[in-house]
């Protein structure tokens, strides 16, 4: 980013995201706000609180939809204070926006998940879903514009993720001088793969994101992909080195802002009673064996199946490891209404069964897969692993790779896919794997299990230092600083 | 390519390719040499004859292997005169080289054919196959080096295609000053997709090709992909604009040389009795209907299945077209020992059956699929189509898109995938489709069927002129001219 001058980061911010920071659910007679887990909510609500600000999100539950009718809600949960507004959509439109396009088209294209010989097939249904996707993005843009117009000073708009790819351009139509950041939390497809989308769709997608002044990604690779994809737009001038796209008389800057984790929050969770109970369960499962752990959503891109294959190769090629290692896979259910996901999970269960039958005995169960939403169990797993396997096919960042080392008690070793965004920060202290390479992954697991104490300590320290260096509470301010520089606000101040 | 000075293109050439220009087969008591079909053989043998030269290829049939023992063969078939030598490999090595790596790994990676959630899985077997691939490439390099050393003047080596990706570097080890061109007839994977290969494999692959002085592709897109992929190599300096890669103290230039078709040869085939008979069969099939044609190898990347889906959408949405159009799909059997290919063909047959059942009646069969190796039938089809559907997922060039317009009698319309290399030359006279977009493809078919005569004539003329401009007999000389300029030979002459 060109250093134009000092920045002010105190302007009010307005956030737009599909999923809100809380979700309302009914508990008995009461409606309660459940705070979302994860660093993103912490980072964004922290920034909101500092600057004073507002958050617009989609109503996702029935109770959210009831809250949506109330307009702005004053939130004061967990020490954070900001205004929240839900947008409610008719269920058919929302389903087309969320499942039809966001999850089944955009998630797939950015993670290279299609079997391109047979899928996707873009037909009229996809066009209808795209219209719904655009309508939802328009509703967000309209709500943001109305909100911004009423504020005493022009705010900074922070538009989150691939659900709202069209938001920046639609907002700029309504407010030509708006200061807009778009952040993609997931990878970005390279030009060939992006162009699997119908032409009108990828053109509109890129134009939508380019409505922002600043486009943020978790890793340099995704930023480069976005820039390369923009070269496919008619008339766009792309400066790959400075990361600027000039198109239709405007400049859009592209930046890399790797998101981090909330270390304090994680440590609090680690001290809870639930975590202690979960820890006992895991210690019981492990016995004297060394523990390989994976923690993921049950998501195609996380690559659980090849992880089991690598473990199987390890047991096959290192007979000495049998009986002395156990693999615990903790998967949170995800998108189980999508056929591809159900089939994939069936294959995972089959792999687990095969490995246990082939190698296990009454005294030793080689692998256990738990599919449920159980944060304390994951936290306890983080404390106890000897090797943490993080081998996604592609992953925007992957916070498991950061959460694990923060909490681990045993100088555990991180085996990390080179295709996770986190690799840029953590790779030098991890054992690097190509996620498609079963043999390499099996060898990395063996290396991790056998590593001597001094080397494990060196690596664990490196990981913790790298994670600590990138402070979560700086994630939004860095974007705002760059936004101020780009929009020249710093010079006017 | 920088214009350094005039070039001499008269040096002797030595060609290396997996498949030779002829293949020997037994007919009764005799062993006869069957000349391979297609423009590539014509282009290369034509160049050999002009310069005098030699060709080294793999023995693929039993009879080839017998010929291999004879050493150099003097060839004089079809008016061409050159020397041919077969290299014979033990069957296991050759299978690992040809099926294990070339067809199942390199073809898949460059055409984006994997369902990456589950395939590929690189294990020890793939490593063993890669060793075989390297051994075959070494045998080629060794044979080329021995040959070149015996020639009065240093020759130009033309190394063909993805089977011999390691050939250039292995030859350069043996002959540091060799003048080497490598030409890829297929697409080249972008960096993310290429890096699905195990790290050692993609590094060795790029290093192998970079052993050449000049690396040729059929289209600018594939050249750009190769250059972008080279940026992933440690220490490589890539000039995307000038298309030069500097690495390990050497420069490799990248050029675009779209291959063409032999127009005279095609016209000769069109006049044959076999073609006339085939023509009668097609005219009988068509009756009064308009004819949509596809001609392809039965190959995943050719996208026959989505072609049928588009035709089905056409019949669904344009009831008026029913009974007035017929679709003839001519597919040459290909790789039917590979499970993915067999399953794909099953799906194609099912689609054809479904369409015929859904829309057909006693007077009208909407679609016919013929799977056999029948060149006269294809040639007759070229003459007779009203619309030619060429919709590959990805295709290095696609010569069907050139052969059809050369022979067509009816001012037929070309519907062409933007992902075929041929699109760069022919796109402005074709109806462009995104091959994944069923609706767009269906609309293009409808537009082609309804197009008025004047517009069809204008487009057909444009296609023929574009094809005629790019002469097949200039394809090798252009590469040799650039090679001479790069290696500075022109200045020494």
Image (cartoon, coloured by chain):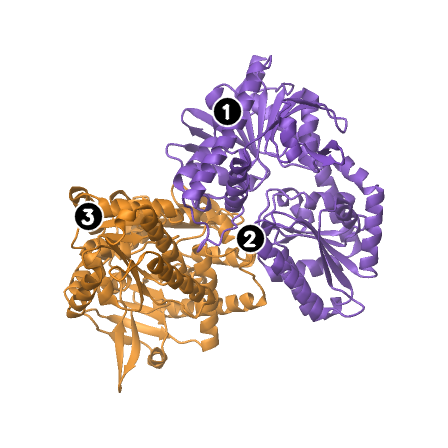
Chain colours: A purple, B orange
**Residue highlighted by disc 1:** A171
Residue A91 visible within the image: yes
Reply above or below: B138 against A302: below
Separation of residues labelled 2 and 1 (CA atoms): 35 Å
- Front disc: 1 or 3: 1
Is label 2 on the same chain as label 1?
Answer: yes
Instruction: Give the label on residue B300, or none.
Output: none
Q: How many marks on residues?
A: 3
* Residue B274 vertical position relative to residue A8 in the rendered view, above or below: below
Q: Which residue is denoted by mark 2 in the rendering?
A: A339
Give the alpha-carbon distance from disc 3 to disc 2, as whole Å. Answer: 45 Å
Between B335 and A120, the one lying in front of the other is: A120
- Which SS class for mark 2? helix
Task: From the viewer's perspective, tell me whether residue B479 is left or right of residue A42.
Answer: left
Q: Secondary structure at mark 3?
A: helix
The residue identified by callout 3 is B460
Do circles 3 and 2 both sit on a common chain?
no
In this rendering, the answer to whether B315 lies above or below A359 is above
Q: Chain of mark 2?
A: A
At x 58%, y 30%, the residue is: A88
CA distance separating discs 1 and 3: 45 Å
């Amino acid at each position: 980013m060109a250093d134009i001058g000092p920045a002010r980061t105190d302007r009010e911010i307005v956030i737009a995201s599909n999923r809100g920071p809380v979700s309302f659910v009914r508990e008995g007679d009461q409606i309660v706000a459940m705070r979302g887990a994860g660093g993103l909510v912490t980072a964004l609500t922290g920034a909101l609180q500092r600057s004073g600000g507002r958050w617009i999100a989609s109503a996702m539950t029935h109770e959210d939809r009831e809250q949506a009718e109330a307009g702005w809600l004053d939130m004061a949960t967990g020490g954070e204070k900001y205004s929240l507004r839900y947008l409610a959509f008719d269920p058919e439109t929302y389903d087309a926006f969320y499942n039809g396009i966001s999850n089944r088209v955009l998630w797939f294209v950015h993670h290279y998940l299609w079997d391109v010989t047979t899928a996707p097939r873009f037909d009229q249904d996809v066009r209808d879903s795209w219209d719904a996707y655009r309508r939802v993005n328009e509703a967000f843009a309209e709500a943001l514009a109305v909100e911004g117009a009423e504020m005493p000073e022009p705010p900074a708009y922070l538009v989150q993720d691939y659900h709202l790819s069209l938001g920046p351009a639609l907002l700029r139509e309504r407010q030509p001088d708006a200061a807009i950041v778009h952040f993609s939390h997931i990878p970005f497809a390279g030009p060939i793969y992006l162009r699997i989308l119908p032409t009108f769709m990828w053109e509109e997608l890129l134009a939508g994101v380019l409505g922002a002044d600043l486009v943020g990604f978790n890793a340099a690779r995704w930023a480069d992909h976005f820039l390369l994809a923009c070269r496919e737009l008619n008339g766009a001038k792309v400066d790959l080195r400075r990361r600027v796209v000039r198109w239709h008389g405007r400049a859009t800057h592209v930046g890399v802002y790797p998101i981090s984790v909330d270390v304090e929050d994680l440590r609090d969770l680690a001290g809870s009673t639930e975590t202690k109970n979960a820890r006992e369960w895991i210690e019981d499962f492990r016995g004297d064996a060394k523990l390989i752990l994976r923690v993921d959503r049950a998501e195609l891109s996380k690559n659980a199946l090849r992880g089991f294959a690598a473990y199987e190769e390890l047991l096959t090629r290192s007979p000495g490891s049998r009986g002395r290692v156990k693999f615990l896979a903790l998967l949170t259910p995800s998108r189980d209404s999508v056929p591809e996901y159900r089939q994939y999970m069936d294959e995972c269960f089959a792999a687990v069964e095969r490995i246990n039958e082939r190698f296990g005995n009454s005294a030793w169960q080689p692998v256990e897969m738990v599919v449920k939403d159980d944060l304390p169990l994951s936290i306890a797993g983080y404390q106890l692993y000897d090797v943490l396997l993080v081998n996604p096919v592609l992953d925007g960042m992957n916070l498991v790779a950061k959460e694990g080392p923060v909490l681990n008690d045993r100088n555990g070793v991180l085996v990390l896919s080179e295709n996770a965004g986190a690799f840029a920060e953590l790779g030098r202290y991890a054992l690097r794997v190509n996620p498609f390479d079963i043999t390499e992954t099996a060898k990395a697991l063996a290396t991790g299990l056998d590593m001597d104490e001094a080397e494990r300590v060196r690596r664990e320290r490196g990981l913790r230092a790298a994670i600590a260096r990138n402070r979560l509470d700086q994630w939004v301010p860095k974007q705002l600083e760059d936004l101020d520089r780009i929009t020249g606000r710093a010079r006017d101040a």
